[in-house]
Image (spheres, rainbow, N blue to C red):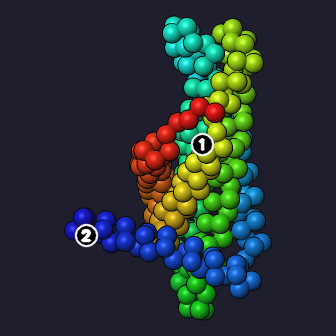
Amino acid sequence: MPLAASAQSFGRTVRLGARTPLIAAIDIVGGRFPIREAVIQASFLLSITVLPALLMAVPFGVIIAVQIGGLTSNLGATSMAGAVGGMGVIQQGAPMAAALLLGGAGASAITADLGARTVREEIDAMRVLGIDPTRRLVAPRMVAMVLVAPVLSILIIVIAVAASFIVAITGQGVVAGSYWQSFGSYASTTDLWICLGKSVVFGFVVVVIAARRGLEAAGGARGVADAVNAAVVLGIVASMVINVIITQVTALFIPVQVI
């Protein structure tokens, strides 16, 4: 039945998500972790996501500045543009943008790679030779993804806030000093740590789903294409759901404070 198959697939994904970090930690402590493979994967992920991150962050910052600027201007609180815009980028915009990039470009690349290996029976050959595909292929990609995700978030924050600042002072008459003063009064290091934590969680979820789909690909090139499509959709949707949960929890236990 479809429901039973979905439950089994979810269970295998959860098992992979629990097993991979444990394997990576054991191999790192034991000096057996394939660092070179992780570096290669991290470099590849950066190469396919940095430029889209830049292209996404600039219009994102401009849109926030225009929307928030119009609202604060109508309320007579233009000095709060920096606070509202900055908090929106740090708390929600940057981690979700990173999740979209990793869930799109990153997940598709990982699923396509592992899926192609699966349909060519390379994964089965590795198991016959006593090589664990999770240890050799999945763990390095997981480490690379969770390292790249915060880097993308920081990059998006810097570019988006800079774009928002430029639009605010040039097109909306906001004083530069008041912009940064309100930004510094409301944005805190706690918000930044929450942003980075979200990015790590999103990257982890995306890579686990992508790896699971790739390892289960079947049916030749069509099966790999279906696996890539499923990995992208599921990774992004899962990140959005988790973002809602994290946002509710942080809003409950970590209220906004004025510094």
The residue labelled by disc 2 is 4
**Distance between the Cα atoms at labels 1 and 2?**
40 Å
Q: Amino acid at mark 2?
A: Ala
Is 152 drawn above or below residue 120 in the view shown?
Answer: above
144 vs 213, nearest the viewer: 144
Determine whether the residue tagged by mark 1 lies in a helix, strand or loop: helix
| Horizontal side of residue 206 vs 186, given as left or right | left
Determine whether 34 is above or below 189 in the image. Answer: below
For residue 61, say whether it is visible. no
Please provide percent x and percent y for residue 163: 70, 25
Which residue, given by chain and number where applicable, does mark 1 sit on? 191
Residue 37 found in image quarter: bottom right
State which quadrant residue 112 falls in. Answer: bottom right
Q: Position of residue 188 (x, y in %)?
A: 64, 39
Q: Mark 2 or mark 1, which is nearer the start of the sequence?
A: 2
| Helix, strand or loop status at disc 2 | helix
Crowding around mark 2 (Cα neighbors within 10 Å: few <14, some 14 to 19, many 20+) is: few
Q: Is residue 52 left or right of residue 10?
A: right
- What is the x, y in percent for residue 230? 44, 56
Judge the density around disc 1: few (<14), some (14-19), many (≥20) Cα neighbours within 10 Å. some
Residue 88 visible in this rendered orientation of the protein: yes
Front one among 2 and 35: 35
Q: Is residue 160 left or right of residue 217?
A: right
